[in-house]
Image: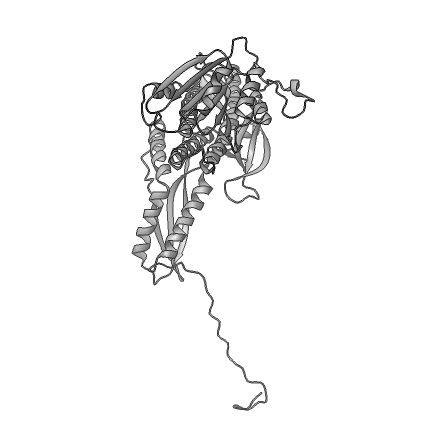
C-alpha cells in the first residue's frame, strides 16, 4: 500500500559530514531540469539540458523557479551548490531522502524539506517522496526524487497569469508550492478515511484474515502520515515567524493560512485514532495485534486527557470480555463543563450573556463539526437530535452563584479547548466592572478574655 519508507543509509557509514551520497532509490531515467522565469510583464519557460543553463538566472531581477526531478546524479547537485553558494550540509540533506521535515535559515537563503504525498496509479496506494525547497531573494529551487508532483496548478497560474503570483516575489512562489503540498494532504486523508470506513464495514459484515492484514497496513499508513504531518506544522510556523528579509509581511498572512490547514490536517489524522478505556486503563490505540492491543496510556499521574508517555499492553481476551468505552469511533465529541463561582452582588444577567457569547465563539468549530457527527450518528442508531450549543446552568449556594458552562468539544483537543475557554472567560470577567469571581472566605473575631484575678480596667 505504501512506497518503501525506510531508505538504505549504509552507503554513508564512516564518511565525514558534508560528503554527498545519494540515499534513496536509484532511478534509471535522466534528471530533468525545468526553468520558469517571470514577472508581471513577461514569462519564459524552458527545459534545460544541463544545470549550467540555470546559472544566468541567479542574478536576474525577475522571479525564477528552477525545478529538478531526480537526485541520483550527485554531480548536478554539486554544481548547483557551488554556483548558488549552498552549504555542504544542506546539499547532504537534499540527497538524503529520509529527512525529517524541517526549515533552516542560512541567511542568504532559506531551506525547507518536507514530504509530498499523492495517490499512485492504484488509488489504494500512497506515493511519498521528499521535496526540498530553497528560497533566495529572487529564486526558488525545488528538488524532487522523481518526475511527477502536485505543482501543476502553480505552473498553470504562472503561465496564464492567474491571481497575484506573477506580481509577487519569490517568497509567494515558495508559499504557493508549500500550499499545493499541504492541500494534497487533504485529498490523501479523505482517501484514507474512506478506506477506514470500508474496512470497518467489512469487519462488521464479513471479517477475514485478509481484513486483519489490511488493518495493519492501514495502521502503518497512519504512522507514516503522523511522522510526515506533525513536523510540517513546525516548518510552516518557522517560516511564518522567520525574520528573513526574503519573506515579506504580505506573504506572512498566506503562511498563517497554510499553518491553519496543517492544524486541521493534524486534527483529522488524530481523529482516525481510537481512544478507549478498558479495565480502568485509558489511552490511544497504537496497535492491534493477534494477542495484544497496545495503548498510549492516558491520565494516571497526568492531569487531563493527556498521554503519560507509557505504552500499555492489554491482552485481547480482556478487550473482548470487558466493557470498552470508545471515545472516538462513530462520534469523537464529548460534553465538558467549566464551573465559575460568581458573587451575589454581581450582575448575573450580564454574566450569562458574556459567558454564552464567549463559549459560542471559542467552540464554534467543534460545535459545527459535532452537529454533523450527531446527525450521522442519528442515521446509524436512530437517536434523537441532541442540543449541542453551549449552555449555562445556575446553582445557588450559601456563598455564591455557581455558573456551570456546558459545551461540546473534540475528545482529543478537550484539555486544550478547556484551557483556551477558561483563559478567555477569566480575561473577560477581570475586565468587567459588574461581574466578580467569588472565593470562599472565613471571618475570624478575636475577643479579649480577662486574666484570672485581674480587675476590669486594670492593665494586665
- Where is residue 309? Give x, y as percent: 58, 37
Q: Position of residue 227 (x, y in %)?
A: 53, 27
Measured as percent of width and height from the top left, residue 431 is found at 37, 56
* Picture layout, residue 325 above or below residue 160: below
Q: Quadrant of residue 297?
A: top right
| Image quadrant containing the C terminus | bottom right
Q: Is residue 140 above or below residue 450?
A: above
Q: Is residue 234 above or below residue 401?
A: above
Q: How is the image coloured?
A: one colour
Write the residue at 40% across / 25% down. Answer: 62
Which residue is at a point 57% across and 12% down the rendered structure image? 26
Q: Is residue 126 visible?
A: no
**Residue 317 quadrant:** top right
Q: Residue at x 30, y 51 (%)?
A: 353
**Left or right for 26, reference 343:** right
Q: Given the current orientation, which residue lies at the most extreme right position?
A: 14
Residue 197, position as x, y percentages in the image = 42, 22
Which residue is farthest top?
A: 28
User: Does 449 sit above or below residue 54?
Assistant: below
Look at the image and tell me whether residue 43 can be seen: yes
Count of numbered circles in the view: 0
Amino acid at each position: 500500500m505504501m512506497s518503501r519508507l525506510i531508505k538504505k543509509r549504509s552507503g554513508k557509514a564512516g564518511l565525514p559530514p558534508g560528503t554527498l551520497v545519494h540515499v534513496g532509490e536509484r532511478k534509471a531515467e535522466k534528471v530533468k531540469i525545468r526553468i520558469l522565469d517571470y514577472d508581471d510583464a513577461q514569462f519564459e519557460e524552458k527545459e534545460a539540458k544541463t544545470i549550467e543553463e540555470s546559472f544566468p538566472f541567479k542574478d536576474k531581477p525577475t522571479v525564477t523557479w528552477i525545478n529538478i526531478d531526480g537526485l541520483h546524479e550527485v554531480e548536478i547537485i554539486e554544481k548547483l551548490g557551488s554556483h548558488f553558494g549552498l552549504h555542504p550540509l544542506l546539499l547532504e540533506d537534499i540527497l538524503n531522502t529520509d529527512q525529517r521535515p524541517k526549515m533552516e535559515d542560512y541567511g542568504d537563503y532559506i531551506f525547507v524539506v518536507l514530504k509530498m504525498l499523492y495517490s499512485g496509479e492504484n488509488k489504494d496506494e500512497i506515493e511519498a517522496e521528499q521535496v526540498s525547497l530553497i528560497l533566495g531573494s529572487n529564486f526558488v529551487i525545488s528538488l524532487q526524487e522523481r518526475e511527477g508532483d502536485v505543482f501543476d496548478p502553480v505552473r498553470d497560474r504562472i503561465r496564464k497569469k492567474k491571481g497575484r503570483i506573477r506580481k509577487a516575489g519569490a517568497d509567494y512562489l515558495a508559499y504557493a508550492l508549500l500550499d499545493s503540498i499541504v492541500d494534497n494532504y487533504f485529498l490523501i486523508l479523505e482517501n484514507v478515511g474512506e478506506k477506514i470506513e470500508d474496512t470497518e464495514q467489512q469487519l462488521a459484515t464479513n471479517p477475514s484474515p485478509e481484513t486483519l492484514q489490511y488493518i495493519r497496513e492501514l495502521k502503518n499508513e497512519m504512522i507514516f502520515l503522523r511522522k510526515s504531518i506533525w513536523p510540517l506544522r513546525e516548518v510552516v510556523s518557522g517560516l511564518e515567524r522567520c525574520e528573513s528579509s526574503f519573506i515579506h509581511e504580505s506573504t506572512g498572512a498566506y503562511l498563517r493560512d497554510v499553518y491553519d490547514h496543517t492544524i486541521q490536517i493534524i486534527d483529522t489524522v488524530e481523529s482516525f485514532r481510537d481512544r478507549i478505556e478498558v479495565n480502568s486503563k485509558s489511552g490511544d490505540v497504537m496497535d492491534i495485534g493477534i494477542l495484544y492491543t497496545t495503548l498510549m496510556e492516558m491520565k494516571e499521574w497526568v492531569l487531563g486527557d493527556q498521554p503519560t508517555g507509557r505504552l500499555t499492553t492489554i491482552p485481547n481476551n480482556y478487550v473482548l470480555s470487558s466493557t470498552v468505552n470508545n471515545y472516538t469511533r462513530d462520534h469523537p465529541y464529548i460534553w465538558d463543563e467549566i464551573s465559575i463561582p460568581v458573587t451575589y452582588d454581581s450582575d448575573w444577567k450580564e454574566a450569562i450573556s458574556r459567558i454564552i457569547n464567549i463559549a459560542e465563539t471559542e467552540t464554534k468549530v467543534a460545535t459545527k463539526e459535532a452537529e454533523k457527527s450527531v446527525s450521522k450518528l442519528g442515521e446509524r442508531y436512530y437517536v434523537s437530535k441532541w442540543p449541542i450549543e453551549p449552555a449555562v446552568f445556575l446553582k445557588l449556594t450559601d456563598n455564591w452563584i455557581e455558573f456551570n458552562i456546558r459545551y461540546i468539544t473534540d475528545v482529543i483537543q478537550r484539555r486544550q479547548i478547556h484551557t483556551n475557554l477558561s483563559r478567555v472567560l477569566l480575561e473577560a470577567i477581570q475586565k468587567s466592572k459588574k461581574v466578580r469571581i467569588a472565593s470562599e472566605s472565613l471571618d475570624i473575631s478575636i475577643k479579649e478574655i480577662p486574666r484570672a484575678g485581674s480587675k476590669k480596667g486594670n492593665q494586665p
